[in-house]
Image: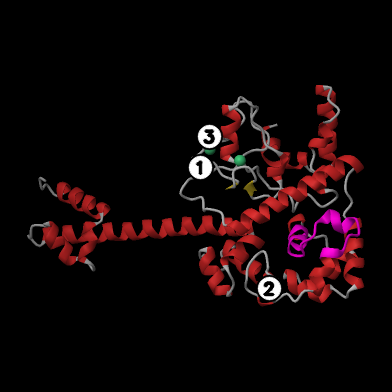
Amino acid sequence: MGVFCATNAMSLNGSGTLATTWSTLLERLTKRTDLHILTTPWWIGDLPIARNLRSSPAWCPACYVEWKEQGLPIYQPLLWMLQVVTTCPNHKRRLVERCPSCQGKQAVIASHKAHPGECTKCALWLGSEVHTSLEQTLDDELINWQEWVVSVLKELRTASLSSGVLSWKAFFTSLARGMERQKGYSQLARLTGIDRRSLYQWVWGTVTPSLELILKFCYVCDTTPMQIMANQWASLEQAIRDDPALRPSPYDRSPWQRVDIERCLGFLQSMLDGREQVLSVRQAAMRLKCAARILRLHFPLECEQVTQMYHEYRKQQKEKYVESVCEEVRNATVTLHTQGISPTRRCVAALLKDPDRIRMPEARRTWRDVRQGLGFTL
Ligand SMILES: [Zn+2]
Ligand SMILES: [Zn+2]
């Protein structure tokens, strides 16, 4: 059971047979008949779950605190399971994916030892009101985008509650008609940064885009999936008529057509695979000649991972540097001593590549330790 929980349980919220079996079983056990609503299809319809659900839960630490204070049960809202949702709509905070103490990802079903809201690995309470230093403040564009995402998801949920699991086929069929009427493929490709071939593949049904990409497409076109499904093309047609250069893009002011989205993703992935030297998102954006905001909006997950890798890389670099300075101090101290010269701080500093290095606390500590080891008293 333990292994199953940690690895396979994500599919419980999904649309596979496993999810159906489990909810049927749980319904029988708990005598509740509304549990099937807790499974993801009711939110995202028949889109493939693998690319739309997180591989491990994310949470809002401020929500946990609030619920605890109000004596409410602590749980994982399904909304947080969707990759496209990256912030808490109530607290405007980025959802967290790793325990701040043990850095562990969370198991979907906690073992009986962990209480809800506690890390499933180290049992730390995951609620917190204060922002950690690693949390970036969210810019307005990200907040607007996420608010829009949540409102659209609620709309989709309401629709699926009243008329059953959504089929996205209706969306793509209607989209095809909306675009065909105005020969809109090229124009929308330019506007959204999604290439024309991909748009054709969407409507032909040869490629199913992720929920995130569908929503970004709608967001930029200033329409919603429900509007498209209802053959309401007014916003879409407006987007097709508009000159993209004149249209203020919700993502960034720089013209869309200059940003090669696939190339950006390729670059981020090559850093994550270790094929490229890891850079900060800002540096990567400079290299790609686009705004960091564009990278973060199109690829929030990848950017977050790159940022984590970059922090880790910088930490390692710093540790290596500190270690090399300590080594230098150690050698200098011992050398002076073997030459019969008293290894005073000034003499040791004079032997270093940069005398100022002796001011580093670690360097001073090493100097004191080595002197003590050589029999000097402080
Ligand atoms: Zn929250
Ligand atoms: Zn932990």
Q: Is residue 40 magenta?
A: no
Task: Identify the secondary structure beneath mark 2.
Answer: helix
Up-down relation of residue 351 to residue 363 (above or below): below
Rounded to the nearest whole Å, what is the CA distance between mark 3 and mark 2? 45 Å
Up-down relation of residue 11 to residue 174 (above or below): above
Tag nearer the camera, 3 or 2: 2
Magenta span: helix, strand or loop, mainly? helix
Q: Which residues are magenta?
A: 214-235
Task: Identify the secondary structure beneath mark 1.
Answer: loop
Residue at 15% x, 66% y is 350
Please tell me in which quarter of the rendered image ligand 1 is found: top right
The amino acid type, in three-letter code, at marker 2 is Trp
The amino acid type, in three-letter code, at marker 1 is Pro
Task: Identify the secondary structure beneath mark 3.
Answer: loop
Q: Position of residue 94 (x, y in %)?
A: 59, 48
Rounded to the nearest whole Å, what is the CA distance between mark 3 and mark 1? 10 Å
| Dot 3 crowding, Cα within 10 Å, few <14, some 14–19, many 20+ | some
User: Circle 1 is placed at which residue position?
Assistant: 100
Q: How many marks?
A: 3
User: Camera-side residue: 92 or 292?
Assistant: 92
